[in-house]
Image (cartoon, helix red, strand yellow):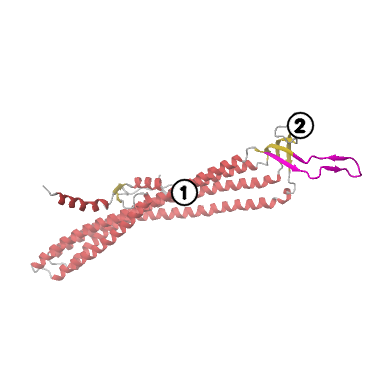
Amino acid sequence: MIPKSIRLMLAASLVPAALFAQSSKELNINQAIELGIANSKNLKLSQNKIDQAVAQLEVVKDNALPSANASFIYNHAEIPTTTFTLPGGGSSLQLPKRADAFVGTAAIQELVYGGGKLKYAKESTRLLADVARLDADKNKEEVTYAVINTYYALYKVAQSKKVIDQNLESIAAQIKQAQRFFEQGVVTKNDVLRFQLQQANITLSQMDIESNRKIINYNLDILLGLPEDTEVKITDPNLGLKSVGSLNEYIVQAMTNRQELKQLDVRNKVADYNIKTVRANTLPTVAVGANLYYINPSGSFIPPVNQYLMPVTIGATVSWNIASLWTNKNKVSEAKIEQNEITLQKDVLTDQVKTDINKNFQTYQVAVNKIQVLETSIAQATENDKLLASKYKNNVASVTDRIDAETLLYQAKINLEIAKADAGIAYYTLLKSTGKITQ
């Protein structure tokens, strides 16, 4: 039976470990992308911009509704002089010492024809809402790519760490073997020291990689919206090399999917409506309205019978700024120049997209070829390592040759894992340049 005091001490010693225990979460690359999109603050900001554009559209729609207003006025007058004599010595008028009056008005007006300005404003605002949605789509692609890039970076350091751990295990075995050989007088003390120096150097590399892993893991936690102390356990994101189509196929996809090109198309339509709006300034406007007046000079809030007036007027207004026929042409020219600039921007961007896709396409091809070359080099390095290991045991090769062979083998393994990750990133970079990563 364990004494109570000892049980308490054991429980207390476990509390810090429980408090500072690091949580972990295993995620494949698709799960990471979903988390990144769901928790991205940039995408939430993009959605807010969409909501703002939609709200602006509703405001423009409200401008097409009839306008109406009403007012009610009470006036009180004090009249110090109550006698008013007409000019020429005529009769006089006797005025009251004070007077009260109530006046009310109500009016409603509807624009029947304004040259199409309201229609063009509504269409332009609707198109600007589409621009905001395309901008959000582009931000979604950027967030997805950032998650993929960080995920692969974490994969790189994880694979490098795995290879280095294997290397350290092998070096530990080499040190034991060298010590036995030294005790048997087969090798010198220098051989043991050389293996131990190699072990120290690899341990330093292991420390650097672990530091990088923690930095990248923290960045990924932020991207995914996870608690900042979560250790992300990743799975192999490659799952075999991806087959790609022809360069022209990706260029065609980009011309269809790239959000920036779509935005310029929409902005070109907005510019077209702006030109129509400017031209509409030369057209007349027609409005109809009705007005109700209430005049009560009796001084009483509720007037006696037949002592108030309530006329109703109905009318139409036609207005035309004739001077706009000759003052508006330069404004139209300015609007056309702005539209032409958008067309030129699209031409420039189209060329940039083509060059980006070609560069990314070639980069992926090179990355795939590097993997094939490195796989061959690993086979060669493995055979060389076995050969030097055998020679060293037989005291034919030096310790330097033995260490160099082993270093070449493990460096080739690390290079292969990095090359696989680089190929994965190159593939997603190619997809990103088409405007749609998830295909």
Residue 357 appears anywhere in the view: yes
Residue where numbered disc 2 is placed: 307
Is residue 84 depicted above or below 357 in this figure? above
> Residue 326, how many percent across, how many down?
73, 50
> Residue 141, how many percent across, how many down?
43, 48
Q: Three-letter amino acid code at disc 2? A: Gln
Q: Nearer the viewer, residue 288 or 324?
A: 288
Under tag 1, what secondary structure?
helix
Q: Label 2 neighbourhood size at 10 Å, few (<14), some (14-19), many (20+)?
A: few
Q: Nearer the viewer, residue 132 or 90?
A: 90
The alpha-carbon separation of the residues under discs 1 and 2 comes to: 62 Å
Using the rendered view, name the quadrant where residue 276 is placed.
top right
Query: From which residue to which does the magenta span run?
Result: 71-99
Q: Earlier in the sequence, mark 1 or mark 2?
A: 1
Residue where numbered disc 1 is placed: 45
Using the rendered view, name the quadrant where residue 413 is placed.
bottom left
Is residue 273 depicted above or below 422 in this figure? above
In the displayed orientation, state which residue is furthest to the top.
305
